[in-house]
């Protein structure tokens, strides 16, 4: 039980840091999902030049190779210490898999599907939300789940700029070579990542298995 001793003796502190961790993760991740989907939709529209969309996808893909601590450090130079630089940095880091997956999926949609929508009298907006978005949902969810996992793990580093979270327990434990305190920060972060991934996986299955794609295929064949 020695490895759990810090968690048993300091449950309030662990819960406080877990709450901070969840807040940082939720703010940055939800914002990244919304902005990432919006950017993906925009760069996949016919009126956006191919080289522009290629450039956006290439940049987001290449930026994945930048260490997360470097992103946080750069943002810290402009915003100072606290939760704000952590949220901004994690938001930027989470955008990468979302935009890459969603934009790539939009570009691989069969043009015949859009023509089928037009043949049924749909507007461009209806084609987007009733046909295109349901088709790219599996790839979108893949990017969203990747972003969530990366975000939760990277949030532990955010404590380096005074953002709080479970990283505080980990870094203090490393400083004093306190194994139980390190575990008190690392274990909840790992469990949180697993829980979020499982919930997103179940949400993906519920959304993508409700017959939307089958209905689209039937309509396109009918037209």
Image: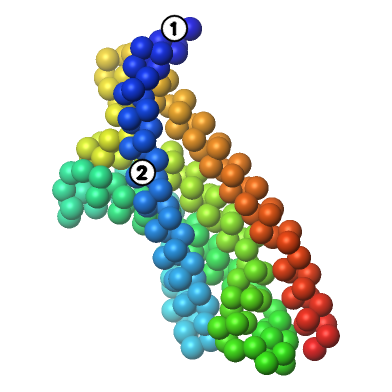
Pick out the residue farthest to the top: 2
Crowding near the residue tagged with mark 1, few <14, some 14–19, many ≥20 C-alpha atoms within 10 Å: few
Q: At 53% from the left edge and 54% from the top edge, which residue is drawn?
A: 144
Mark 1 or 2 closer to N-term?
Answer: 1
In the picture shown, does residue 7 fall above or below 106? above
Residue 107: percent from the left, percent from the top?
59, 75
Q: At 52% from the left edge and 82% from the top edge, which residue is drawn?
A: 45
Q: Which mark is residue 23?
A: 2
Between 73 and 215, the one lying in front of the other is 215
Residue 18: percent from the left, percent from the top?
38, 32
In the picture shown, does residue 188 fall above or below 134? above
Residue 42: percent from the left, percent from the top?
47, 77
Between 56 and 143, the one lying in front of the other is 143
Q: At 33% from the left edge and 22% from the top edge, which residue is drawn?
A: 12
Q: CA distance from mark 1 to mark 2?
A: 29 Å
- What SS does tag 2 mark? helix
Question: Mark 1 = which residue?
Answer: 2
Q: Is residue 98 left or right of residue 5?
A: right
Q: Please state, as top left, top right, bottom left or bottom right, where the C terminus lies in the image.
A: bottom right
Between 172 and 125, the one lying in front of the other is 125
State which quadrant residue 16 falls in.
top left
Determine if residue 178 is in view. yes
Determine if residue 182 is in view. no
Question: Closer to us: mark 1 or mark 2?
Answer: 2
State which quadrant residue 38 falls in.
bottom left
Q: Is residue 104 left or right of residue 10?
A: right
Q: At 60% from the left edge and 89% from the top edge, which residue is drawn?
A: 123
Between 190 and 15, the one lying in front of the other is 15
């Amino acid at each position: 039980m020695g490895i759990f001793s810090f968690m048993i003796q300091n449950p309030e502190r662990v819960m406080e840091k877990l709450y901070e961790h969840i807040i940082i993760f939720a703010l940055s991740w939800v914002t990244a999902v919304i902005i990432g989907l919006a950017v993906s939709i925009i760069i996949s529209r016919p009126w956006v030049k191919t080289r522009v969309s290629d450039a956006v996808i290439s940049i987001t893909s290449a930026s994945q190779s930048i260490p997360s601590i470097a992103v946080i450090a750069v943002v810290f130079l402009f915003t100072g210490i606290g939760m704000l630089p952590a949220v901004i940095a994690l938001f930027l880091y989470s955008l990468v898999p979302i935009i890459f997956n969603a934009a790539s999926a939009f570009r691989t949609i069969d043009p015949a599907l859009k023509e089928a929508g037009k043949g049924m009298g749909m507007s461009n907006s209806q084609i987007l939300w009733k046909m295109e978005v349901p088709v790219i949902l599996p790839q979108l969810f893949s990017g969203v789940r990747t972003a969530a996992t990366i975000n939760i793990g990277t949030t532990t580093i955010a404590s380096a700029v005074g953002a709080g979270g479970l990283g505080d327990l980990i870094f203090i434990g490393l400083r004093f070579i306190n194994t139980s305190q390190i575990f008190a920060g690392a274990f909840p972060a790992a469990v949180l990542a697993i829980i979020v991934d499982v919930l997103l996986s179940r949400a993906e299955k519920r959304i993508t298995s409700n017959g939307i794609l089958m209905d689209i295929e039937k309509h396109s064949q009918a037209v």
